Structures are given as C-alpha cells and as structure tokens.
Image (cartoon, helix red, strand yellow):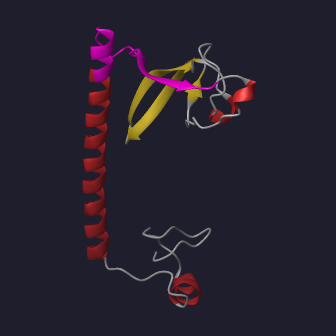
C-alpha cells in the first residue's frame, strides 16, 4: 500500500486483494502497487530485523529501569514480583481547583486495584502503571503523585 485506504489497509502494508479491486480502486488511484515474491520476502526479513532490534531496545530499557528501582529502593526485583517499587514521583497541583489533566497513561490502577477513569491523574496518591516498551516487554511501577508545596 502506498497510502492508507479505509477497510483495505494502511500505507506500507502488504495486502492481498482481488485483481478487480487492485485494478479498479488501488492502481488507478495510485494507492498501491504490485510487488514480487522476492520483494515480499525482503520486506518481511527487514521487518523481522527491525522488530528484533526494537525488542532488544525494550529489554535494555526495562533492565535500566529495574536497575534504577533497585538502586533507589535497595532491594532486588524478583521475577515473580510484578511491582518493584516507587520509581517516579511527580509534583502537581492537586484537587478540584487544580484543573489539570496533563498526566495521561494508557493503563493505570489506583491503590485499590481499580482502573483509573479516563486515565487522568487528578488527585494525589499512588498509581500502579504498566509501560509497554515493545513486543511482549513491559515494566510495572508505582507512580506516586504528591501535592506541590
């Protein structure tokens, strides 16, 4: 695909469509082009290489975060432990008068284990956060939000 087409594919995707769809919709509007089996193999090999590099970077980032948590807490994170401790503290204005929704995460739970609505932090407290770093690599940490003085 050269450009994104709703219900068909995104730019850069390798897709299989009928010859009629290709000729009448994609080729005519220059939204896609035919590629050979060799090009497909080369693109897939390149994609696998990029994914492997991204996964390695994610693993390295996770290791670095865990080392920082270990250094700040003085205790080692075990493999059966999901949460390694407080790794980040942010000072923000808190309460209804603060009017802030600047801190947003894709997955977050409060100290009771309940999902935080709209993923906005509006109150002080501790929040369990999961940061996805790459292919099946994620780090769980506690975000502690304290009131500004």
Image point (25%, 61%), residue name: 45
Q: Judge whether 15 appears above or below 93 on screen.
A: below
Image check: 141 left or right of 75? right
Range drawn in magenta: 68-93
Seen at 26% across and 75% down, the residue is: 38
Q: Position of residue 99 (x, y in %)?
A: 71, 33
Q: Is residue 92 visible?
A: yes
Q: Is residue 76 magenta?
A: yes
The residue lying toward the viewer, choosing from 33 and 65, is 65
Where is residue 69 drawn, in percent x and y?
A: 33, 19
> Where does the image place residue 15, in percent across and percent down from the top left?
46, 70
Quadrant in the picture for residue 116: top right
Q: Nearer the viewer, residue 124 or 15?
A: 124
Number of labels in the image equals 0
Q: Is residue 78 visible?
A: no
From what the image shows, is residue 71 above or below residue 51?
above
Residue 39 vs residue 130: left or right?
A: left
| Residue extending furthest toward the right | 96
Quarter-of-image position of residue 5: bottom right
Question: In the image, is residue 145 above or below residue 138?
Answer: above
Work out which quarter of the rendered image holds the C terminus and state it.
top right
Relative to the observer, which residue lies in front, 69 or 17? 69
Most foreground residue, 139 or 10: 139
Residue 87, x across and y down, in percent: 40, 21
**Residue 2 painted magenta:** no
Q: Residue at x 66, y 34 (%)?
A: 100
Q: Residue furthest top?
A: 75
């Amino acid at each position: 695909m050269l450009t994104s087409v709703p219900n068909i594919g995104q730019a850069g995707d390798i897709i299989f469509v009928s010859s009629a769809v290709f000729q009448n919709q994609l080729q005519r509007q220059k939204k896609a082009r035919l590629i050979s089996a060799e090009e497909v193999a080369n693109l897939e090999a390149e994609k696998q290489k990029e994914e492997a590099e991204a996964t390695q970077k994610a693993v390295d980032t996770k290791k670095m975060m865990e080392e920082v948590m270990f250094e700040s807490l003085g205790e080692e994170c075990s493999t059966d432990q999901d949460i390694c401790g407080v790794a980040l503290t942010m000072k923000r204005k808190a309460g209804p008068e603060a009017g802030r929704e600047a801190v947003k995460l894709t997955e977050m739970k409060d100290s009771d284990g309940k999902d935080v609505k709209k993923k906005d932090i509006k109150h002080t407290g501790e929040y369990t956060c999961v940061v996805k770093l790459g292919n099946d690599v994620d780090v769980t940490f506690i975000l502690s939000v304290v009131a500004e003085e």
